[in-house]
Image: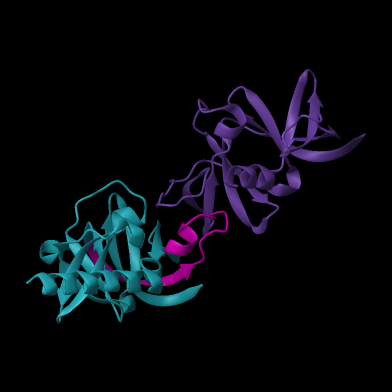
């Protein structure tokens, strides 16, 4: 079964992934990353964005491996767990807003992949950020 | 968000932290620190020194160890108010008033939720505001005090 919705497609290395458009607020140039000691996996620090303190969550090593290139832009997104807060996701290039049909993922897909988008020959996993991040934390 | 508070800024390794000035009684040089090796069964590896003050023993937490950082040179000790605890730090910078302390973003889920009361904005810098009660809890303090008392009585018996 497929359903048509809007998604933000973003590159990480040689691959593309997608977030539901309603979870994304903007694409921004990287601000100054500010770091302090912590023990939460994936978080690299915080940036200041429009007067907000926004945690930066680097999901690239999880999705494309440890050789992932540094992010050129930050995708500002909500995780469903923290609706009122943004999380900055470093991505390696420009993003695309697309309205397309989402298909159910394969049975063997990781739990954080909630759907798959078919764009020509390309299959783009739709990622649930909260599941991806909490899976790593626990 | 808590508004308008005097803070002491201090450094540990390459990081700057803030602590409420009202939580600090005194800042001392680290010259008077006495080496202390707590028994592993006490489970307080962050305490590496003691300090004598008015005849009482204060337990000094190495902030590098507390924040899981690599060792860096200790030059100052922040003595906390109303508790026999000191915090050994790289250096103290200055006192400043922060307009607000903001909650730590909820994406932070680890020990830092205990380490920090929140974060302060000082100019364009986001500075973690430490939670003074996270350095040693009541139980750890009691175990340390018992250890010191036991050391004293052993020394007294052998003298």
Residue B137: tell me if it is visible.
no
Q: Give the image quarter of residue A2.
A: top right
> Residue B106 appears at what percent x and percent y?
57, 58
Q: Which chain is cyan?
A: B
Image colour for chain A is purple
* Placement of B128 over or under B3, stated as above or below: above
Residue B154: tell me if it is visible.
yes
Magenta span has A27? no
User: Seen in the image, is A131 located left or right of residue A59?
Assistant: right
Residue closest to the far right: A1
User: Seen in the image, is B119 located left or right of residue B73?
Assistant: right
Q: Residue at x 15, y 64 (%)?
A: B33
Given residues B93 and A93, the one toward you in this image is B93
Q: Quadrant of the N terminus of chain A?
A: top right
Magenta span has B107? yes
Tag count = 0
User: Seen in the image, is A48 located left or right of residue B82?
Assistant: right
Q: Give the image quarter of residue A120.
A: top right
Q: Give the image quarter of residue B149.
A: bottom left
Q: How is the image coloured?
A: by chain
> Residue B139 appears at what percent x and percent y?
40, 72
Question: Which portion, as a residue range, is magenta?
Answer: B92-115
Q: Residue at x 46, y 63 (%)?
A: B114
* Placement of B37 over or under A88, stated as above or below: below
């Amino acid at each position: 079964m497929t359903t048509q919705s809007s998604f933000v497609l973003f590159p990480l290395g040689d691959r593309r992934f997608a977030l539901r458009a309603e979870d994304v607020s903007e694409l921004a140039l990287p601000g100054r990353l500010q770091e302090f000691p912590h023990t939460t996996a994936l978080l690299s620090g915080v940036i200041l964005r429009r007067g907000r303190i926004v945690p930066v969550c680097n999901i690239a090593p999880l999705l494309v491996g440890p050789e992932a290139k540094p992010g050129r832009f930050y995708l500002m997104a909500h995780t469903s767990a923290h609706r009122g807060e943004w999380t900055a996701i470093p991505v390696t290039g420009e993003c695309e807003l697309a309205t397309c049909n989402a298909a159910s993922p394969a049975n063997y897909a990781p739990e954080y992949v909630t759907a798959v988008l078919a764009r020509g020959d390309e299959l783009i996993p739709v990622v649930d950020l909260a599941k991806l991040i909490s899976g790593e934390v626990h | 968000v808590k508004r308008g508070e005097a803070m002491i800024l201090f450094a540990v390794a390459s990081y700057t932290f803030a602590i409420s000035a009202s939580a600090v009684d005194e800042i001392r040089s680290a010259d008077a620190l006495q080496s202390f090796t707590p028994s592993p069964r006490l489970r307080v590896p962050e305490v590496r020194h003691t300090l004598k003050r008015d005849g009482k023993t204060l337990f000094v937490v190495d902030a590098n160890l507390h924040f899981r950082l690599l060792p860096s040179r200790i030059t100052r000790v922040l003595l906390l108010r109303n508790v026999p605890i000191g915090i050994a730090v790289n250096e103290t910078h200055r006192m400043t008033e922060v307009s607000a302390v903001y909650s730590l973003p909820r994406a932070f889920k680890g020990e830092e939720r205990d380490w920090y009361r929140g974060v302060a904005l000082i100019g364009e810098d986001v500075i973690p505001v430490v939670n003074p009660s996270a350095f040693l809890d009541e139980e750890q303090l009691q175990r340390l005090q018992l250890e010191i008392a036991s050391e004293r009585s052993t020394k007294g018996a052998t003298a």
